[in-house]
Amino acid sequence: MSWTAAFADPIPLPGGKSLRTLKDAGKFIEKLPEAEVSKPAWQTALHVVLQAADHGGPIDFARLGVMRALYPTELIYDPERKGPKWHNTRKLARDR
């Protein structure tokens, strides 16, 4: 695969533009500040983009890596919001 390989779906950027090829993704990552690129999510994104472009790695992994770095999600456990595992509103015959 090469740097001109296109993603199946373009990666939308917050500014309204989109990344369509591996080359676009590489240039975008290259323009990021050093503090941002040193974060683990961007290191992973850079790795999978390089793997896809230079070594024939899966282009879908490259897209996923950039998407996860652009739009991070953090799972937070909040015991206050946890509902019951089941909710039985019916009463048993013996309890009526």
Image: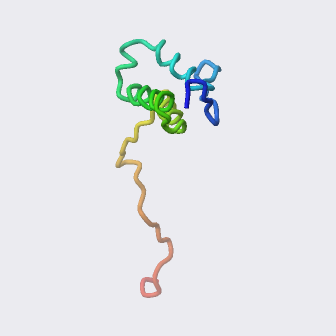
Q: Check the image and report above or below for 11 versus 77.
A: above
Instruction: Locate the N terminus and report the quarter of the image it occupies.
Output: top right
- Side (left or right) of 27 relative to 94: right
Q: Position of residue 43 (x, y in %)?
A: 38, 26
Q: Position of residue 27 (x, y in %)?
A: 52, 16
Residue lying farthest to the bottom in this orientation = 94
Q: Check the image and report above or below for 45 versus 96.
A: above
Q: Check the image and report above or below for 90 versus 82.
A: below
Name the image quarter holding residue 76.
top left
- Residues 83 and 47: in front is 47
Which coloring applies here?
rainbow
Q: Position of residue 94 (x, y in %)?
A: 42, 87
- Side (left or right) of 86 relative to 2: left
Q: Position of residue 34 (x, y in %)?
A: 37, 13
Please give the name of the residue rendered at 42% of the width and 56% of the height, measured from the top-left corner.
83
- Residues 74 and 4: in front is 4
- Residues 90 and 5: in front is 5
- Residues 26 and 95: in front is 26
Name the image quarter holding residue 18.
top right
Please state the total of marks drawn on the protein image.
Answer: 0
Please give the name of the residue rendered at 54% of the width and 36% of the height, measured from the top-left corner.
59
